[in-house]
Image: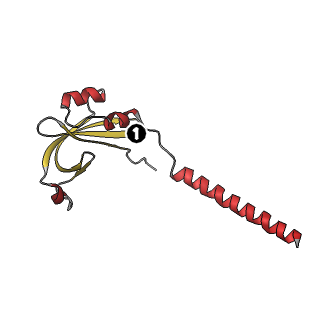
């Protein structure tokens, strides 16, 4: 009887260790933490209401791309296209100049309103080719 209990205990421990090892491996592959880049820190610390020139100075360089667009800001970090069904809830579309920086696999945008002030800012990591 003692030998049978010992075998069951060993089998149980081996099963738990195996399952935890597989889970940890999958977790590290899927949920691998990303280092926060200097661009992400810089755009997140950009004050709203700052002038366009001051924003460029804060970012440290001129933008890589500048686009004129119309959109609806839900918040300082979320802009909706005017044709988005949710946009009506947040007001009429407004004109913005989107100033974009691309560094170290991160893109950051600063939205400038028609008065020349920062109205929104956000960053993201474009999907890597697989």
- Left or right? Give the position of 19 relative to 7: left
The residue positioned 65% from the left and 57% from the top of the image is 20
The quarter holding residue 48 reads: top left
| Circle 1 residue | 105
Q: Position of residue 62 (x, y in %)?
A: 26, 28
Q: Identify whether 97 is placed above or below 93.
A: above
Q: Is residue 38 above or below residue 68?
A: above
- Where residue 117 appears, as percent x and y from the top left, is 17, 35
Left or right of 124: which side holds 111? left
Q: Nearer the viewer, residue 97 or 44?
A: 44
Q: Identify the residue shown where x is 34% and y is 33%.
A: 42
Question: Where is residue 124 shown, x and y percent of the image?
Answer: 35, 44
Quadrant into which the N terminus falls: bottom right
Q: Secondary structure at mark 1?
A: loop
Seen in the picture, residue 25 relative to 101 is either above or below; the reply is below
State the residue at coordinates (74%, 61%). 14
Q: Most extreme residue toward the bottom, as rendered?
A: 1
Location of residue 51 with respect to 73 vertically, above or below: above
């Amino acid at each position: 009887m003692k030998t049978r209990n010992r075998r069951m205990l060993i089998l149980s421990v081996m099963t738990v260790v195996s399952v935890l090892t597989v889970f940890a491996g999958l977790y590290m592959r899927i949920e691998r933490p990303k280092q926060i880049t200097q661009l992400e820190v810089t755009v997140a610390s950009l004050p709203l209401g700052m002038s366009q020139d001051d924003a460029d100075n804060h970012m440290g360089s001129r933008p890589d791309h500048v686009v004129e667009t119309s959109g609806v800001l839900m918040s300082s970090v979320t802009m909706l296209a005017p044709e988005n069904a949710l946009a009506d809830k947040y007001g009429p579309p407004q004109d913005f100049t989107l100033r974009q920086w691309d560094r170290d696999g991160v893109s950051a945008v600063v939205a400038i309103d028609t008065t020349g002030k920062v109205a929104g800012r956000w960053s993201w990591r474009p999907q890597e080719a697989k």
